[in-house]
Image (cartoon, rainbow, N blue to C red):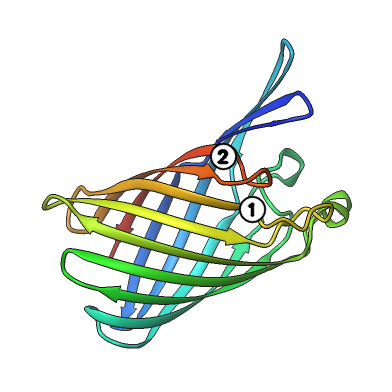
Amino acid sequence: SHNDDAGVKTQTGQPQVQINYGILDPLDANVTVPYLYVRQTQGSDTTDNNGIGDITLALKWRFFGEKEGLQFAIKPYVTIPTGDEEKGHGYGREAYGIRLISTFDREAWCVNVNLGYLYNEYGLQYNRDAYRPDIWYAGLSGQLRVFEKLWLVGEAAVGRNPDVTSDTPPAYILGGFIYEITKNIDFDVGYKYGLNKPAMDYSISGAITMGF
């Protein structure tokens, strides 16, 4: 991603590996392991801070509907402070969140509505002073199969601004694709574009998702 603030240009990337495990038909466990690349440039000075981010553990329970058609699911999750908060790779302590997900699924397309909440007290005092502990967000996304193993994806989302000095919710749109490498392994790439000043200018993300 890319952002300019007070003459400092920040570029970040966050590829991740996600593992999904089906415990029961309506219940899945999920582990997400991100790796962060952070480069800051001010004038002729450039610093790089790379490392693993906070690992997320989640459970997703589909409490209404079948795998095709209208579904509702709830997804509680916790982030484990494995990232270095001094370098900006993590929160510094556990954070807790929950998502409510509504999906209308067909064989060749699907639409999702996401509502979420995150509570995060941060590990460092200056982060607790600078950022709000509770964040809400909402998003609308969709997927469309264009070839046998290739899906196009799109998303629009908005959330509460974590910066205590601003009440403007950051908003963004995202476009990308998912490629099914095998039946249980997907590769996805997305380009996120910020729609207003509080949002990051743009970012490019990638992930490998494995299901069992």
- Which residue lies at the image location 51% right of the left edge and 38% below the top edge? 203
On screen, residue 84 above or below 10: below
Label 2: which residue? 36
On screen, residue 212 above or below 164: below
* Front residue (pair 190, 127): 190
Residue 48: quarter of image = top right
Mark 1 or mark 2, which is nearer to you?
1
Label 1: which residue? 170
How far apart are the alpha carbons under marks 1 and 2? 21 Å
Name the kind of residue labelled 2 in the image: Leu
Tell me, for residue 104, which label it has, or none.
Answer: none
Q: The residue tagged with tag 2: helix, strand or loop?
A: strand
**In the image, is 149 to the left or to the right of 113?**
left
- Sort mark 1 into few (<14), some (14-19) or many (20+) by Cα contacts within 10 Å: many
Question: Residue 9, image x and y in percent?
Answer: 68, 26
The numbered mark, 1 or 2, whose residue comes first in the sequence reads 2
Q: Quadrant of the N terminus?
A: top right
Residue 26: quarter of image = bottom left
Question: Residue 50, image x and y in percent?
Answer: 60, 33
On screen, residue 7 above or below 165: above
Name the kind of residue labelled 1 in the image: Pro
